[in-house]
Image (tube, helix red, strand yellow):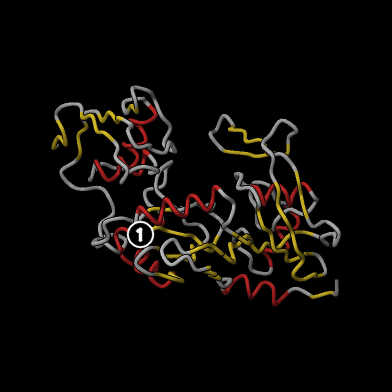
C-alpha cells in the first residue's frame, strides 16, 4: 500500500474551484482512491469544510477551507483506465450529440448511472474522463436518473460550468422529456402543480410522493400521440425535483411504462410483451444559452431503436 499523504491537508478554495461539488473535488485531489472510499470518508466526517461535516453534494465556495485526512491508496490505481472496460467507454463516443471546446452533450443510455458511487463503480462522467485522458476538466452540469436516457450536459471548462449552473438556477434551461404513459392523458391537463416530498426507506431506496408539506413542483405536459392503451407525452419539468415527472404522471393516474418504482404492473407486463425492457422516459430536447458565444443552442437526442419499435407496434388513435 502507498500513502497518498501522511498528514492532514488543509486546502483553501479559490475562484477556479468555486461551485464544484466536494465529491468531485476530492476525486481530483485523491487520484487513485476508489470513489467508494471517498464517499466513505465523507460520510464519516473525516473530510471537513470550514471545520464542519458536509454531504457529497455540497458545492464549494471561494474562501472555503477543506480538510483532507491522511488516506491510503492501493498501488494499483482502481479508477477507470482507458484500457479497462474499453468497449463501453468507446461506445460513449458514439453517444456524443454535440461538442465544442466548452461543453458536450451526450445521449446517455438507459441503465447507465451518470457517475460512480452508491454501489456503482463508474458512470458516464468516469467513462468520459477515461475516453479523454488529456481533458483537464470534465464535470456534469446536471443529472439524469440511471434508467432515464437522453440529453446530458457536460462542461469542459469551469467557467462554462458556472455559467450553465446560473442558467439552471435562473430556470432559463429548457429540458423536454418524452414518456409513454398508461391510458388516455386528459387533453385539458396541461400543467401539474403538486408538491413533492422525498423519503428514504430503511433499505436506503429513495421514494418520492405527492405531499402537501413537500417542495413546490410543476411539470407541463403536452400530448404527442394517443394510442389505444397509452399516450406518448412531452413533459417539461419547470422545477427539478427527484423523480418529478414519474411521480407527477402517476398522480394523474398515468404511470410511465417500465417504471419499477411507480409503475403499473399489468401495463408494464403488456408493454414488455411488445419488447419494452426499460423505463420509457427520455430526455429528448435540451435548449440553453452557449456559455461562450451567447447563442441559443438546441440539442435533440433521438429515441433508441427499441423504443421506436415499441411505438410502431401500438395502435394510434386520434386526439
- Indicate the position of residue 179 as horizontal and vertical percent values: 68, 62
Q: Is residue 129 left or right of residue 281?
A: left
- Which residue is painted at 39% across and 41% down in the image? 21
Quadrant assignment, res 129: bottom left
Q: Quadrant of the N terminus?
A: top left
- Indicate the position of residue 271 as horizontal and vertical percent values: 70, 64
In depth, the one of 267 and 294 nearer the eye is 294
- Which residue is painted at 39% across and 25% down in the image? 53
- Which residue is painted at 35% across and 39% down in the image? 36
Crowding near the residue tagged with mark 1, few <14, some 14–19, many ≥20 C-alpha atoms within 10 Å: many
In depth, the one of 142 and 73 nearer the eye is 142
Instruction: Single out the residue that lies furthest toward the front.
Output: 294
Q: Is residue 29 above or below residue 230?
A: above
Q: Is residue 215 left or right of residue 38?
A: right
Quadrant assignment, res 26: top left
Q: Quadrant of the C terminus?
A: bottom right
Q: Is residue 305 above or below residue 202?
A: below
In depth, the one of 290 and 109 nearer the eye is 290
Count of labels shown?
A: 1
Q: Is residue 294 above or below residue 14?
A: below
Q: Which residue is mark 1?
A: 156
- Indicate the position of residue 316 as horizontal and vertical percent values: 80, 75
Q: Secondary structure at mark 1?
A: loop
- Indicate the position of residue 84 as horizontal and vertical percent values: 27, 59
In depth, the one of 36 and 288 nearer the eye is 288
Instruction: Single out the residue that lies furthest toward the top.
Output: 51
Amino acid at each position: 500500500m502507498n500513502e497518498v499523504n501522511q498528514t492532514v491537508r488543509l486546502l483553501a478554495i479559490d475562484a477556479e474551484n468555486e461551485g464544484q461539488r466536494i465529491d468531485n473535488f476530492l476525486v481530483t485531489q485523491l487520484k487513485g482512491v476508489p470513489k467508494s472510499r471517498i464517499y466513505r470518508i465523507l460520510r464519516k466526517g473525516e473530510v471537513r469544510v470550514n471545520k464542519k461535516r458536509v454531504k457529497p453534494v455540497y458545492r464549494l465556495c471561494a474562501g472555503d477551507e477543506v480538510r483532507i485526512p491522511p488516506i491510503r491508496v492501493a498501488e494499483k490505481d482502481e479508477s477507470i483506465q482507458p484500457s479497462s472496460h474499453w468497449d463501453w467507454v468507446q461506445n460513449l463516443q458514439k453517444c456524443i450529440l454535440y461538442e465544442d471546446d466548452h461543453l458536450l452533450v451526450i445521449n446517455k443510455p438507459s441503465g447507465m448511472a451518470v457517475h460512480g458511487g452508491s454501489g456503482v463503480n463508474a458512470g458516464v462522467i468516469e467513462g468520459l474522463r477515461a475516453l479523454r485522458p488529456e481533458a483537464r476538466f470534465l464535470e456534469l452540469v446536471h443529472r439524469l436518473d440511471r434508467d432515464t436516457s437522453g440529453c446530458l450536459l457536460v462542461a469542459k471548462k469551469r467557467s462554462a460550468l458556472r455559467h450553465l449552473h446560473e442558467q439552471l438556477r435562473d430556470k432559463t434551461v429548457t429540458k423536454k422529456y418524452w414518456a409513454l404513459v398508461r391510458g388516455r392523458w386528459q387533453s385539458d391537463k396541461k400543467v401539474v402543480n403538486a408538491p413533492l416530498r422525498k423519503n428514504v426507506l430503511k433499505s436506503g431506496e429513495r421514494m418520492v410522493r405527492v405531499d402537501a408539506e413537500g417542495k413546490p413542483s410543476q411539470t407541463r405536459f403536452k400530448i404527442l400521440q394517443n394510442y389505444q392503451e397509452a399516450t406518448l407525452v412531452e413533459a417539461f419539468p419547470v422545477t427539478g425535483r427527484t423523480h418529478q415527472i414519474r411521480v407527477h404522471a402517476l398522480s394523474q393516474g398515468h404511470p410511465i411504462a417500465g417504471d419499477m418504482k411507480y409503475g403499473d404492473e399489468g401495463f408494464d407486463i403488456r408493454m414488455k410483451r411488445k419488447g419494452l425492457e426499460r423505463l420509457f422516459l427520455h430526455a429528448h430536447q435540451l435548449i440553453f444559452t452557449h456559455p461562450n458565444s451567447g447563442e441559443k443552442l438546441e440539442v435533440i437526442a433521438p429515441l433508441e431503436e427499441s423504443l421506436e419499435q415499441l411505438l410502431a407496434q401500438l395502435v394510434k388513435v386520434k386526439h
